[in-house]
Amino acid sequence: MNRKLIWAVGLMLTATFALTSCSDDDDDNRTPEIPVEKSYDAYVVNNGNWGANDGTIGAIQGVHTDTPSYLDIYKQENNKGIGDAQDAYITVSADGRDGLVFVTSTTSSKISVLDTKGKELHVQLLPNVQPRYITGEGSDVYFSAYNGYVYKMNRDTYRITDSVKVGAYPEAVAIADGKLYAALSNYDMSGNGKYLAEVDLKSFKKTKDIEVGLNPYSQMVAVGSKVFFVSNLDYSDNILQMLDAATGKVTEIGHGTSIAYDKLNDDIVCVSAVYGHPEYDGIYRYNVSSGKKTDIKLSQTPGNIGQVSVSPQSGYLYIVNQSYTGPCELWVYDQYGAFKTKFQSGMATQQVIFLR
């Protein structure tokens, strides 16, 4: 069975969701020290085994070389596990340097704030909220939660300053043209999860729902006024779509299960690895400006292709080789698909997040 489906069904059977207010008692009023030293080139979010709370935050040194190395930095710095890490966002400090790593954990229902070495600076416990995906702009970070809300959190004080109800089981989030978009998934299998919720950032009010393919899920990337996202449909296919935030028009691009933005080439790199449908398998580029699609031919192919990420400096592709029995691997290719190296990461690797 598709691991994403197992995860979704498992959470549905065990979790309860209720909006609760967040405490301001735990050091919310202090201003944290912003780290100024970049310790690593990229960070890796590993979800862990379902229900085991054994996810990790790792880091990669030597991303732009042929011999990168991986380290579980959270455990090294804090001598404990982080929980079921789901997503992460790296903020930019006021002087333009990379600042803090905000991590969402769903079943442990919290936001963890780390410095760039992996040291935990703050934990915001959010009982019954269940944070999912996270993004940010300026001095604020925004995260979706399975209780149906999107929250706004200040980057410097860690205070949650606002929230807005967007709809059932929001997942991936992205920002374009002064608006935040949240994927309203079909997590409850009702058939109603087929929208992107639009939130005006200035008022922080929901303005509308935009109908898209059934079950928009974990993949959303904003490039200018265009928002790219993946819908899982009924898990028999997965499709890549594009929303023009200026017009509200939605365009279907093709099959796709995982996407990332290649800044060097202005391309969306899309992996299509549809469970049970090898005829859809492949990797291609979609140029944001021209709309041209170009296939990528991998010189070696992982056995179980998962998430793709792209280095903004070198254009190297980092593709997860998923494992359901042990740690995953990261396979590294140059921008043309030539295999460079591979190395072990963590359990249920979600993505690689590169420093800017």
Image (tube, rainbow, N blue to C red):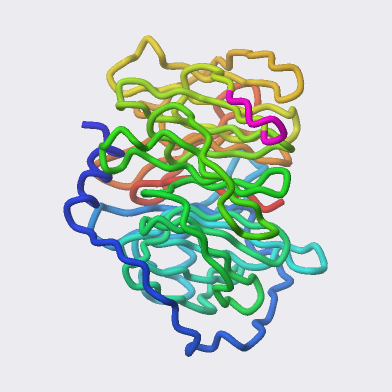
Q: Nearer the viewer, residue 27 or 190?
A: 190
Residue at 60% across / 71% down in the picture?
A: 115
Residue closest to the eye, 4 or 189:
189
Could you tell me what secondary structure mostly forms the magenta stretch?
loop
Q: Residue furthest front?
A: 207
Residue 248 on the magenta span: yes
Q: Quadrant of residue 245?
A: top right
Disc tally is 0
| Left or right position of 21 against 254 | left
Q: At 61% across and 49% down in the image, what residue appears?
A: 180
Q: Is residue 112 left or right of residue 236?
A: right
Q: Quadrant of the N terminus?
A: top left
Vertical order, 33 against 193 (above or below): below
The residue sitting at the right extreme is 95
Residue 263 counted in the magenta span: no
- Which residue is at 57% across, 29% downward? 333
From the viewer's perspective, tell me whether residue 183 is left or right of residue 161. left
Magenta-tinted stretch: 245-250
Return the x and y of residue 64 as percentages of the image width and height.
Answer: 67, 43
- Residue 28 placement, left or right of 65: left
Q: Is residue 93 above or below residue 286?
A: below
Question: Looking at the image, which residue is at 67% across and 53% down?
Answer: 355
Residue furthest left as drawn: 13
| Picture coordinates of residue 354, whole percent (x, y) | 63, 49
The x, y position of residue 11, in whole percent, is 24, 52
The one of 197 and 55 positioned closer to us in this rendering: 197
Q: Position of residue 142 (x, y in %)?
A: 57, 59
